[in-house]
Image: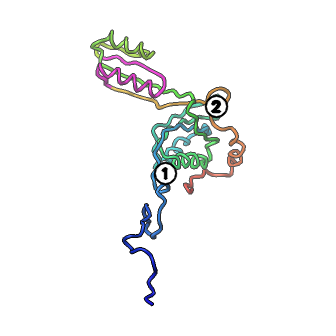
Amino acid sequence: MTGELEGPAPEERPTPEGKRNSQGIRVDPEVEAEREPRRTVISALVEHEPGVLSDVSGLFSRRQFNIESLTVGPTEDEERARMTIVVEEPDPGIEQVEKQLRKLVPVISVRELPSDAMRRELALIKVNATRPDQVAAVADMYDAKSVDASPETATVEITGSRQKIDAAIESFGQFGIREISRTGPTALARGTEDTAASAQTAEQTSRHQPTQTQTTSDDD
């Protein structure tokens, strides 16, 4: 009796698909696959106080989130400001952006906005003015407003969606673009829906006690 097991030779045995990690454990290809990033808008309602923008931008820097743009401005409440943050990350990264923002004491509420939210961006575009009539025609096409003109240049102001701004820049490119300045989008939810989830306010308020200091931990 040799003790050998019956069955096909090793080279004839079926080999499961997939890879093994450093411990030799087979990895599920679906789990291993990297998730594609997506572009989305996050709205954060924050205390209108010095240092908030620095706190948030510092968080992004530490965590190395892929932030496309960040705008901040006052709201209808003089004690509150609204941040509109455009991120391009896989879903786990987007979840982490929201989670880490909620850990900052000045942040009152955070919400990823739906795709139908109202999003607007402002851009100033300075072009060569050798063909002023044609520049004006393109400006009319995109409802742009002339804000400065000289014999050499023309500057227009345009507001709208990112797609509209991109299309306008492409059209103005035929005249020779000298400079562009864009704000990045700001956004509000439609109708009576709250832009930043108000349901979080009560929970967040308990963290806004005078004896507490700002939370800067980046732990998951």
Looking at the rendered structure, the secondary structure element under dot 1 is helix
**Residue depicted at 46% across the width and 30% down the height:** 183
Q: Residue at x 42, y 12 (%)?
A: 140
State the image coordinates of residue 64 (x, y, percent, origin top left). 46, 49
Distance (Cα) linking label 1 and label 2: 30 Å
Residue flagged by tag 2: what amino acid is it? Glu
**Residue carrying label 2:** 78
Q: Quadrant of residue 7?
A: bottom left
Number of numbered callouts drawn: 2
11 left or right, relative to 104: left
Q: Earlier in the sequence, mark 1 or mark 2?
A: 1
The foreground one among 49 and 127 is 127
- Identify the residue shown where x is 32% and y is 11%: 132
* Quadrant where the N terminus is found in the figure: bottom left
Mark 1 against mark 2, which lies toward the viewer? 1
In the depicted structure, whether residue 9 falls above or below residue 196: below
| Residue 69 among those drawn in magenta | no
* Residue 176, image x, y percentages: 29, 22
Residue 45: quarter of image = top right
Q: Decide: few, some or many residues near mark 1? Use Cα within 10 Å; few <14, some 14-19, many ≥20.
A: few
Q: Any mark on residue 63, and which? A: 1
Which residue appears farthest toward the top when viewing the image? 133
Residue 172 is a magenta residue: yes
Please provide percent x and percent y for residue 78.
64, 31
Q: Quadrant of the C terminus?
A: bottom right
Secondary structure under tag 2 reads loop
- x and y percent of residue 173 in the render? 32, 22
For badge 1, the amino acid type reads Arg
Q: Which residues are magenta?
A: 153-178
Q: Which mark is residue 74?
A: none
